[in-house]
Image (tube, rainbow, N blue to C red):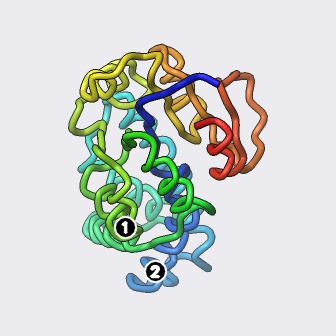
Amino acid sequence: MKTYKHIFFDLDRTLWDFDSNSRAALTDVFEIHQLARYFESPEPFINGYHKHNEVLWDRYRQGTIKKELLRSLRFDLTLQDVSVEDTDLAKAIGEDYLQLSTEKTIIFPYTHEILAYLHEKYPLYILTNGFRETQFSKMKNCDLSKYFHTVFTSETIGFNKPHPKIFQWAVSSVNGRKEECIMIGDDIEVDIEGAKSYGIDQVFFNPERLITESVPTYTIESLSELRGIL
């Protein structure tokens, strides 16, 4: 088994259950802003949000849109789907959603157990494309901060995963060598192919057993399986 010295984790959908937490926060927003005036139920509102958010996040990763616009535009477009033109409402929803989502604390099974185990053996780091302030809040509220030496965000570094420069920055910052590092994440393109292109090993966290043409260094369905790798 290869020996590693530096372990990098993605946060959303790898440790922090983004989909469950997001749905809970969006449901809260639906009630707070009385969106039943415009949508039959929370479901079409949530589905519309995810549709627009996915497209806008791709643009954000590519550097063609700023986070300030992303935060409100995804809700502005969702409201426009039901013929509501209200940029002030979209902005208010966006602000509330960010705050409420960071307060949600659903994490994947074995998160604390595996991080406590790894923390005793390695320096651990977060490498995320998420917004700096929200990622720190999520980690604090889920009691995850204590496990990590450093949180590297794309905002701070100036490049988004899968760009090789974000991996280069993180590895250089910990005085590591490529062969000593491994990236653990859920996104094939962003985490796995990004790390592979830079030249570091990868663990694909795949609890849904998705079929992919990519061949990661390792694939796991449960975080507990990291004990057999690290």
Q: Which mark is residue 225?
A: none
> The residue under label 2 is which amino acid type?
Asp
Categorize mark 1 by other alpha carbons within 10 Å: few (<14), some (14-19), many (20+): many
Residue sitting at x 57%, y 66%:
20
Disc nearest the viewer among 2 and 1: 1
Residue 172, position as x, y percentages in the image: 27, 21
Categorize mark 2 by other alpha carbons within 10 Å: few (<14), some (14-19), many (20+): some
Residue 100, position as x, y percentages in the image: 37, 73
Q: Which residue is mark 1?
A: 102
Marks 2/1: CA distance?
13 Å
What quarter of the picture does the N terminus occupy? top right
Q: Secondary structure at mark 2?
A: helix
- Specify whether residue 90 is in view: no
Is residue 149 placed above or below 20 in the rendered structure? above
Residue sitting at x 55%, y 59%:
111
Residue sitting at x 42%, y 16%:
178
> The residue under label 1 is which amino acid type?
Thr
Residue 66, position as x, y percentages in the image: 26, 41
Is residue 145 placed above or below 227 in the rendered structure? below
Does residue 221 appear left or right of residue 46 in this picture? right
Count the marks: how many? 2
Viewer-nearest residue: 90 or 214? 214
Viewer-nearest residue: 63 or 163? 163
Q: Which residue is mark 2?
A: 28
Q: Quadrant of residue 147?
A: bottom left
Q: Who comes first in sequence, dot 2 or dot 1?
A: 2
- Specify whether residue 182 is in view: yes
Residue 116, position as x, y percentages in the image: 48, 57
Residue sitting at x 46%, y 71%:
105
Is residue 120 placed above or below 22 in the rendered structure? above
